[in-house]
Image (cartoon, rainbow, N blue to C red):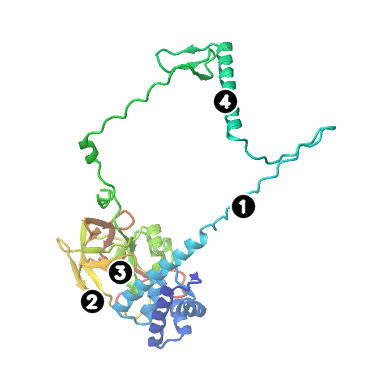
Amino acid sequence: MSEGTGAAEAVEFARLLRELKDRSGLSYGTLAKRLHTSTSTLHRYCSGTALPSEYAATERFARVCRATPDELVELHRSWILADAARRRRADRAQEPAPVPPAPTPEPEPEPAQDTPAGVEPVVRTVTEPAPPRRRRHALIACAAAVVVLAVAVAVARPTIWGGGGGGKTGHSAAGTTETTDLAAPPEPSPPAPAVSAAETTAAPSPTSTPTPTPTPPVDAPAPLTVGIRPYVYADPCSQHFLVNKAPAQVGPPAGERDAQRWAASNGAVSSDEQQVALTVQGTGADTVVLEALHVRITAKGAPLAWNDYSMGVGCGGGVDTKSFDIDLDRGSPVITLHGGQRDFPYKVSKSDPEVFYVTVHTKAHDVRWDLTLDWSSGERRGTVRVDNGGTPFRTSADVNRPGYDYPLGGNEWIKRTVG
């Protein structure tokens, strides 16, 4: 559970929950018992002060309240937007506060110089500028002093000149200083290279040439993400797994939230039927068109001779969800529409995701399969592979295999009776 939502997306999500609860006529206490949670938690969900950390809890709430297939899809979309807003606020809260610039230290006053004993301090006064004639004599005297000093240096320290005529640059014998031959006239600067008319007109004007639109690299990531829930429970009784273990070696059943972990730890495979949820969302401002969804069979064999374990008992009738339906027993399986599901294409963006349910079933095979989703955005096109974390999904028929249930309040698996 996530506390402190407060965003507009969370307020809208809470409104949908309240509508479902009010229409169902069930109290918070009754719902809490059916969902195995606390009354206060449900109240926070419906008031918008808390947001479920995973959608599975929301879907169970909606199904108990008898939500329609359209309402389930709308509720899922609303939860995705509220959860994204919560994550953005959490990221901003973790950003370090800007550090103010350090104040510029004021220059320290120069220390006063001590006046030697017996010497009166000199008082600096501003005098009027000397007449132009006197100033000209002073400049001539300074220039003469510079020439005398330069000649004295040249006589006292002979230099080693580099080759060439004209203005020369010399280096001392130690190679650490440079002097200039004051008596040599400076070389004239070389003329600037001529620029032809062709060269002058060839340079494009920076304001006349439009900036080309950058083309994404060939290996740029697809502009969409696909979130996967590999085991969707219409209700706990709807989900069965085949496990190649004796009942004493299998732990208690798992809810939808822990189904993937439970299946991985037991090497479990969905029995007879499997429903997968795909949450497709754009990653940028551009709209992404979802063109088509395809199924691919990677392997098919005889059904597994394993034990069947149910994830729940004593459930009521489930809600018929809009979905894409696939019969894995067909020679070339195709995707069909079920429960009023609309066919492709669809459009998604960062603020407008879509949720798709895909239901597969088999009565005669052990099948490994995955999906591919075709997309386009502007000039770009591509295909996204949809699988179970890098491996194909797997669904096997239950052909008269021993079945086991885990009664409510029990502590062991009980063999299911037939008839």
Q: Position of residue 16 (x, y in %)?
A: 38, 80
- Left or right: residue 106 compared with residue 268: right
Query: How many angstroms separate mark 2 from mark 1 (CA)?
Result: 68 Å
Q: Which of marks 1 and 3 is nearer the N terminus?
A: 1
Q: Which of marks 3 and 4 is in front?
A: 4
Instruction: Write down the residue under mark 2.
Output: 339
Q: Which of marks 2 and 3 is nearer the N terminus?
A: 2
Q: Do the residues labelled 3 and 4 touch (CB within 8 Å)?
A: no
- Which residue type carries mark 1? Pro
Q: Quadrant of residue 30?
A: bottom left
Q: Is residue 206 above or below residue 184?
A: below
Instruction: Write down the residue under mark 1.
Output: 103
Furthest-bottom residue in view?
25
In the rendered structure, find residue 368 and report the number of the disc placed on it: none
Query: What residue is rendered at 40% in x and 64% in y?
Result: 247
Q: Are marks 4 and 2 in contact (CB under 8 Å)?
A: no
Q: Is residue 23 above or below residue 146?
A: below
Q: Helix or strand or loop: what does disc 4 sit on?
A: helix
Q: Residues within 10 Å of mark 4 (few under 14, many from 20)?
A: few
In the rendered structure, find residue 355 and report the number of the disc placed on it: 3
- Number of numbered discs: 4
Q: Helix or strand or loop: what does disc 3 sit on?
A: strand
Q: Position of residue 376 (x, y in %)?
A: 22, 59
- Which residue type carries mark 2? Gly
Query: How many angstroms separate mark 4 from mark 2 (CA)?
Result: 106 Å
Q: How crowded is mark 2: few (under 14 residues within 10 Å), some or many (20 or more)?
A: few
Q: Do the residues labelled 2 and 3 touch (CB within 8 Å)?
A: no
Q: In this view, does 227 lie above or below 46?
A: above
- Which residue type carries mark 3? Val
